[in-house]
Image (cartoon, rainbow, N blue to C red):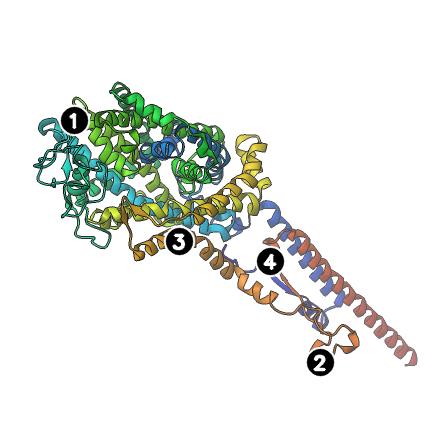
Amino acid sequence: MDTAPSLFTIERRTVLNEVTEVDEDPSEVLKNTNDTIEEDQYEADNILETDSTPLDLFQDPEEPNERGQWTNKLEFLFTCIGYAVGLGNIWRFPYLCYKNGGGAFIIPYFVMLLLIGLPIFFLELSFGQFASLGPLTIWKINPLFKGIGYATVATVWLFDIYYNVIVSHILFFLCASFKSIFSGIPWDNCNHEWNTEFCIDSNHNTSGMTYNSSGTNATVFSVVLPASNSTLNNVTYRTAAQEYYNIYVLQKSSGIDDIGSINWRLCLLLLLAWSIVLICLIRGVQSLGRVVYFTALFPYVMLTILLIRGVTLKGASQGIIFYLKPKFSELLNARVWCEAAAQIFYSLSCCTGGLIAMSSFNKFKQNCLKDALIVAFINCLTSFYAGFVIFSVLGFMAYEKNVDVSKVAVGGPGLAFEVYPEAIARMPVPALWAILFFLMMATLGFGSQFSQVECFICAFTDEWAHIIRKSTATSILFRVIVMAKFFLLGLPMVTYGGMYIINLVDSNAGGFPLLVIGFCEVIAINWVYGYNFFSKDIELMLGKPPGLYWKVTWKFVTPLIIFLTILFNSISYKNMTLGDYKYPQWAIVLGWLVALFPISMIPIFFLYRYCTEGGHQLVQALMKPAADWGPAKTADRTGRYAPKIKSVKFSRQDSIFKDGTRGVIKISLNENRQELSSSQKEREKDIDEEKIELKQTDSFA
C-alpha cells in the first residue's frame, strides 16, 4: 500500500509555545485552540465513519474500468470444466491408476479429492468471486503475500508456453489423419523414408526384415532410439507409430545437449495454435464464453464414441479388468497416497490462478459452492471414465500382440502419440477413428489453454487496468503482444531437442511449485487473514457461512496433507528422465531452477513489501535498546541514562491505518486538551497574581 501524505501533524510543545507567546488574551487563544482541536477531531471521526477501507481515502473517485462478466452461469461452469478437464485426464490418470493398485487407486484418489482437492477448489472460486479481481490484484487481502499471486502467474506462464507446443503435436496428427483419408495412415507400416531397420509394424513386419518373435528378444515399446550398430539378437525394436512420432514428427535428437534447428512444420502449427487462441480470446470472457460450449461438451461426445468402439474390440475386457482390478496391498504404500494428492492438484488445475481469474467474472451472489462441487466431481469422474476408453483399446492391443496388458500400458504423451495411434492403425477404417481421437485431444488441449492464457492476461489487466483497459484497442493490442511473445518463447520447444525441454519444464513446473503455492495460499487466507473473516465474506455472498467440514479442512487437514506430500516428495525425489534417457547434471540443475522460479516469488515479494512499507525501520527500531534499558536504580541513571523530556508527535495518517484509531485520535487530542487546560490554569494564576500586584500598586499610589 502506498503511503499517503499526512493530513495534519500536531506537536504539543509547539501548541503550548503558541499559547504563551501570543499577545492576545490567553483565554481567547485557548478557546480558539480548543475549537480547532474539536473540529479536527470531528473531521477525523467523520472520515473513519464514512468508509472503513483505508485505500478509499486516496483512490480516484471515478469508477474503475469495466472488467467484463459472464453472460450466464453456464458459461462459467463450462469454462471451469474445460479448464480442469484436459489432456492429463486422458493420458495421466489411467496410467497412474493401473500403476498404483488398479481399482484400489480410486480410494486414495477420492479421499484426496475430499481432503485437499475440493477444499482448495472452493476456496479459490469463492476468493476470486468475492473480490472480482485477478490472481495478482486480489492480494490486496494481504500485500505482504502478493508473492503468492506472482508465483501462480509465473507457473501458469510456464504452462502456457509448453502446453500449446503439445497442442501443435496434436494438430500435426490431426492434419495427417485428414490426409490419410486419401493416402492411408502414415504410421501403420515401416515402408516410409523415415523408418529405420529397427521398425516393426502392426503385422510384425520390419523394414526389409521379417520379424521372428521366437528368434529375438525384442522390446516393442521403447521410446529411446537404439544404437546404430545393434545386432539382430537383443535388439530394441520400435513400432511404426513410435518412429513416426519421434523421427518424422519431432525429428528428435539424441539429447538435450543437441538442440538442433527449428522444426518448421511444428513451428507453423504452433503459430496456428496461438492464432486460434488469439481469435477465441480477442475480446476476453465475452468471446471465451461463446467458445466453451463446444470445447467443454464435444470431448464427451468423442469419448463416448471411442468407448463404444473400444469395448467392441477383441480383448477389450482384458484391458478393463486390468484397469479396475484392485490391489489393496498398494494402499499401504505412502507413495500411492502422495501420487493421488499430486494428481488431484494436476487434474483440478488448482493453484495456477485460473480458478481465481474465471470466478472473478461471476456475479457477486452466484452460488460458487454448488459450482465447485459440480466441476470437481465432473472432472474426477471424467478421469475415471477416460480410463475405460484407454484401457479397452490397450486390451485390444495386448490381444493382438499376444502379450500382457502391462507390456503396452504407458502414460504421458507416449500414450497419445505412440500407443493409441498404433491401436487405431489396427482398427477398421483407421482414418475415421484417428480424426475423432485427435479432434477430441485438440479440443481438450484448447479448452484448458484458453483458460490458462486468459488467467495470465487477467492478472495484468487488473493490475494495470488504467493502462490496458483504457480502450478496446489497447486491450486487444496487449493480447496480441502477449501471445506473440508466448509463440517466440515456445520456439526452443519445437527444435529437434524440444521434447527434452518440454519434459524438463513439465516435470518441474507442475510438481513442487503447485504444492508450495497451495500450502501458502491456505495459510495466508485462513490463518493470516483469518478463517472467521473469510467465512463472513462467503456468508456475504452465499447467505450462509461455510460449514464445519470447510473449517476443519481449510485450517488443519488440507495444509497438513500438502505439507506431508511436499516432505515425502522431497525425500523420495528422483532425477527426471524421458523414457530411458537420463538428463545431464546441468539440465537437472536447470530443472530445479525452473521449479524454484515460481516458489522464490513468495519470499522475494514478502521481503520487498516488508522493507518498502516500513518494515526496515521497524527492524531498526526493534534492534535498539528498550526505553527503560540502563542501570536499575534511578540514582545511578546519569549521563546518557538521565531522564529526558521529549516532545510527542502524532499524525492522523498513523491513526487511520491502525486498529482502534478513533481511540488514538481522541486520546491524543484529550492529552493536548489537558495540557492546554493546565497551561490555562497556570496562565490564569499568573494573571491573578498580576491583578493583585496592580491592586497593591494602586493602593500604594
Q: Nearer the viewer, mark 4 or mark 2?
A: 2
- Residue 504 visible, this orientation: yes
- For marks 3 and 4 on the same chain, the one whose residue lies earlier in the sequence: 3
- For marks 3 and 2 on the same chain, the one whose residue lies earlier in the sequence: 3
Location of the C terminus (image quadrant)? bottom right
- For marks 4 and 1 on the same chain, the one whose residue lies earlier in the sequence: 1
On the image, numbered disc 3 is attached to which residue?
A: 596
**Callout 1 touching callout 2 (CB < 8 Å):** no
Q: Position of residue 163 (x, y in %)?
A: 29, 42
- In three-dimensional space, the C-alpha distance between marks 1 and 2, rounded to whole angstroms, equals 96 Å
Q: Position of residue 291 (x, y in %)?
A: 30, 31
Q: Position of residue 141 (x, y in %)?
A: 51, 47
- In three-dimensional space, the C-alpha distance between marks 3 and 1, rounded to whole angstroms, equals 44 Å
Q: Nearer the viewer, mark 3 or mark 4?
A: 3
Which secondary structure lies at badge 2? helix
Q: Amino acid at mark 2?
A: Gly
Q: For residue 325, which quarter of the picture?
A: top left
On the image, numbered disc 4 is attached to which residue?
A: 654
Closer to the camera in the image, 589 or 481:
589
On the image, numbered disc 1 is attached to which residue?
A: 431
- In three-dimensional space, the C-alpha distance between marks 3 and 4, rounded to whole angstroms, equals 38 Å
**Callout 3 touching callout 4 (CB < 8 Å):** no
